[in-house]
Amino acid sequence: MTPKAGTSVLVYDVGGSHVAAAVCHPDSYRLGPVLSAPHPDEPTSDAFISVVHSLGIRASAGLEPVAGAELAFPGPFDFAAGVSHMKHKLPYLFGVNLRQEIAARFGWQPAQVRFLHDSAAFLLGEIGAGAARGVQRAVGITLGTGIGSAFAVDGRVVTEGNGVPPGGEIWDLPYEGGIVEDAVSTRGIRASYERRTGHAREVAELAKAVTVDPAAAESFAEFGYHLGVALRGALAVFAPEVIVLGGGISRSPGLFLPTAQRELGALGAELRVSALLDDAPLVGAGVEWFNSLQRSSPQPISEAAHSSAD
């Protein structure tokens, strides 16, 4: 079965602890109610597929039949084949042909189930209906336990080309004797605070304490410095117009964004915080689905930036 243009699609965002799902409609990539469920207690692929199926049935209840499903997944993952290569996250999915298994559960043809990288989905969502609409050259950065990245030109994610690091990944680029992710992540903020005080605290606690704890404020400012410097080096050749920030740390932009923007300096890119927040990967999955129908020879997006971020 070939999916028809103009038909809604189920979209999923598979995170480290839960799965979110909604129906995405072709009119302006509008989402229906977003449902979520934790990963199954039983660590099996069959139990995971049951969660995916249940969410899809509930999300699409009372609507016209959907054309299929597009799932945003973390890497490493063979997005064309629908096979996970993850061993450290969701190890019970390793090597499973999720395209075949999910299609069978819904009673679909395998072509009705597609996958893309969650970093690509985040950026595509912001391009389609968020902070990067109308931008020719954009980069998406997700900030959390790691740093995820994706690059786009004219509305399509690219993983190679002038100024694009291998696979679109910046997390493991060399930076100050280590790699970018050492400094630009939650562990970078925690390490900065512990170095100043000798105490370990979670980043969420530090964000709440900045008005009464100078070391917390300094740790976020240092994070902003490293973010700006690292992005200036990693993106200089690609020269994006806009860099969209997502992930948990981006929820506290006032603590680091001014410093990061200043350190970007001559790069000339504008840092913007995600307009869609948690919905961005869901919208992005819809964007990729509907865009693929318009391409003369639809090809799944190749793997975009992988990081250790959830």
Image (spheres, rainbow, N blue to C red):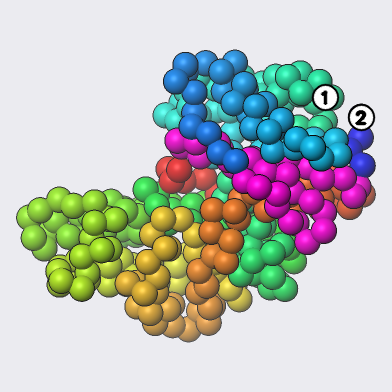
Q: Is residue 199 left or right of residue 109?
A: left
Question: The residue tagged with tag 1: helix, strand or loop?
Answer: loop
Residue at image position (65%, 27%) is 54
Marking on residue 233: none
- Asked which quadrant contains residue 57, the reply is top right
Farthest residue in the front direction? 62
Residue 97 percent location from the top left of the image: 67, 21
Q: Which residues are magenta?
A: 5-34
Q: Which residue is mark 1?
A: 108
**Quadrant placement of the C terminus:** top left
Residue 43 percent location from the top left of the image: 47, 18
Q: Earlier in the sequence, mark 2 or mark 1?
A: 2
Name the foreground residue: 41 vs 243: 41
**Quadrant placement of the N terminus:** top right
Answer yes or no: do the residues labelled 2 and 1 have beta carbons within 8 Å?
yes
- Above or below residue 11? Residue 40 is above
